[in-house]
Amino acid sequence: MKQDRFLTGILIGIGALILLALVLFFTRKDTKAYQASDAPTAVVYNYVLAITNEDYEKAYTYLADKENKPTYDEFRQSFFNGSIHTENVGVDVGEAEIDGDDANVDLTMVYSSTDPFSGGYSNTDRAQLVRQSDEWKIIYMPYNFWAYDWYQEPIK
C-alpha cells in the first residue's frame, strides 16, 4: 500500500512538472525589441533582427547609400531565391571599433547542426559600417546575411 502511494506521488509530481513546462512554454514572451540606431553595434543588431523577422523593408534601411547598392527588389529577392540562408545561424554582436566615419563590429556566427549526431560550430567575422548623414549604415556583413554581389560593379 505504501508503494502505491509513493508511485502515485511520483506520477503526480511528474504531471505537475509537465503542466508547468507547458504553461511556461505557451506564455513566454519571445519578442526581441529593436535598439536605438545610434551605435554601430545597434545597427548590426537591428539589421539581423529585421532579417530574422523577415522585415526586409526595415533591414534595407540599414544599408549604406553607395555605388552599386542593390535595389530593394534585388535585396529582397536574395532571401527568396536561396542565395542567402539565415535559417541555421545565430549572430552574437560583439564590440565595435570606430575610426572616424568607419566602424567594424566583431561578430560571432553560431551555426546549428543539421543532423542529430554532431554539434554546432561558430566562427568570428566582422561587419563593416560607414557613417552617412550622422547615421551608421552597413557596407558589409558576413555570408548568411549578405549577398556576394551587393555593392560590386556589375560584370560587363
Image (tube, rainbow, N blue to C red):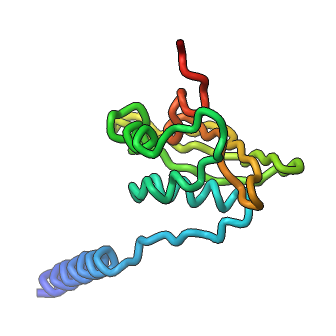
Q: Residue furthest right?
A: 100
100 or 18: which is nearer to us? 100
Q: Seen in the image, is 147 located left or right of residue 5?
A: right
Residue 82 in the image: above or below residue 38 = above
Residue 41, quarter of the rendered image? bottom right
Residue at 35% across / 34% down in the picture? 82
Q: Seen in the image, is 126 located left or right of residue 110?
A: right
108 or 130: which is nearer to us? 130
* Residue 152 image position (x, y, % from top left): 60, 26
* Residue 67 image position (x, y, % from top left): 64, 35
* Residue 13 image position (x, y, % from top left): 26, 82
Residue 3 in the image: above or below residue 122 = below
Any part of residue 73 in sight: yes
Any part of residue 52 in sight: no
Q: Quadrant of the N terminus?
A: bottom left
Residue at 55% across / 55% down in the picture? 61
Q: Seen in the image, is 61 located left or right of residue 140?
A: left
* Residue 30 image position (x, y, % from top left): 41, 71
Residue at 36% across / 36% down in the picture? 114
